[in-house]
Amino acid sequence: MSNISSSLTAGSTDSFSNALTKNTVAMLVWLTLSVINGSMVHTFLRHSRFYENPRYIMFIYMVINDAVQLSLVTALYVVSYIFRKIHASVCCFLIMAAVLTTRSTPLILAGMALERYVSICFPLHYGHMCTVPRTFLLVFIILLLTAAPPVTDLLVTAVHRPPSFFHADIFCDHPLLFSRRSIYYKNCVFDGVYLSCVALTLLYTYCRIMAAARAASTGLASVRRARNTVLLHGVQLLLCMLAFVVPSLQAALISLFPRFSLEIRYIFFLLVYIIPRFMSPIIYGFRDEQFRKYWTRYLACRGQSTVRVLLFSSVFCFPPSSVFLRLLFSSVFVAGHHLKVLCAARASSGQTRVTLKA
């Protein structure tokens, strides 16, 4: 976690064009993922079949956790270029929240693996083992476990630092804020035990899931789908674990190629903290048929509304004497109207299916 801000230590020596490009890319990625995550949360909250299902509760918890982490990391990145130093108390809040969300992701993956393990290996007991209250209890336990290290870091620092330290302006970096060696050793021990337990949990559950899938499968399609899911989760876990080992690797590469230190830091920033945030929408948003159906329906209807807004804004921005623009606007309006009719037809067909099932 320390390389979130230490990756930007030399940010002030970067040229203006490079700094502008890097910050623009970071902000565009943040905006894109925020729109995707927001649409997923909205879809989840609108349908009871999702917020009454433990699997989707864990999924949306991961989406929210990734969105918060991405916002914090992007804020730290941009702030390090705009302000060389910030208030120590503000830095403390940002660093602690970023550490909490970073450490939560592997535990959420382990919880989702356990839910799938119970669902496949113990289907008759799934109803009373995986319930909504127990899922929220698991979320609370994850928050407690991941909040313990940053809270202890703060307590140790508060004991050994004067109160004036938290009112000073500092460069927002984890090693500078929590500089005690005891904190470093404590975090190394915690991360080692924590990641070992998560890795063993994922390995055990997914091996059992693969064995059960092969035994119960009548064709190759379901086995292939289970194998792809395992591979995607493995890649996601490896990308999450990079956040704990990348500072040492980054320091070694910078010592070998000091001329490219800024580029190395930026590449690690993208690989460790940005790209893994795309994994959750790919794994669940697109691959899950139930969620994809409702999510794409919501995106189609929102797209129709956006087209209508752009239409009317364009009408007021361009002169009405242009015949070409009038034809273009009318075509877009007709397309938007047909899209609205399609959304209404899909919604009515869904209601009809529910009524027939009832």
Image (spheres, helix red, strand yellow):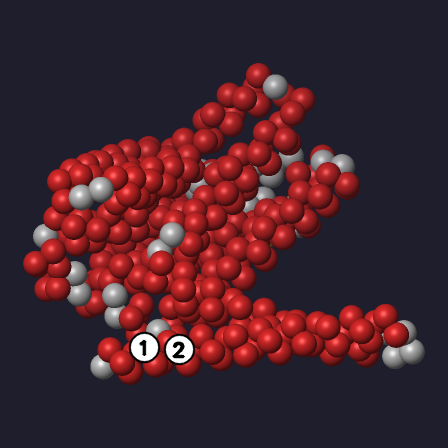
Camera-nearest residue between 221 and 89: 221
Q: Residue at x 51, y 45 (%)?
A: 274
Whole-angstrom CA distance, mark 2 to mark 1, is 6 Å
| Image position of 277 with respect to 268: above or below | below
Query: Residue 103 location, x and y as percent?
Result: 35, 46
**Which image quarter is the C terminus in?**
bottom left
**Which image quarter is the N terminus in?**
top left
Q: Residue at x 64, y 31 (%)?
A: 262
The three-letter code of the residue at mark 2 reads Ser
Corner quadrant of residue 47:
bottom left
Q: Residues within 10 Å of mark 1 (few under 14, many from 20)?
A: few
Q: Residue at x 50, y 52 (%)?
A: 70
Point out the residue furthest to the top here: 256
Camera-nearest residue between 95 and 203: 203
Residue 62 visible, this angle: no
| Image position of 113 with respect to 348: above or below | above
Q: Residues within 10 Å of mark 2 (few under 14, many from 20)?
A: few
Q: Residue at x 63, y 53 (%)?
A: 28
Would residue 284 be found to the left or right of residue 13 on screen?
A: left
Query: Residue 138 location, x and y as percent?
Result: 22, 58
Q: Which mark is residue 349?
A: 2
Callout 1: SS: helix
Mark 2 and mark 1 residues within 8 Å of each other at the beta carbon? yes
Q: Which mark is residue 353?
A: 1
Residue 48 visible, this angle: yes
Camera-nearest residue between 223 and 74: 223
Query: Residue 64 location, x and y as percent?
Result: 41, 60
Would residue 46 be found to the left or right of residue 209 on screen?
A: right
* Number of residue marks: 2
The three-letter code of the residue at mark 1 reads Arg
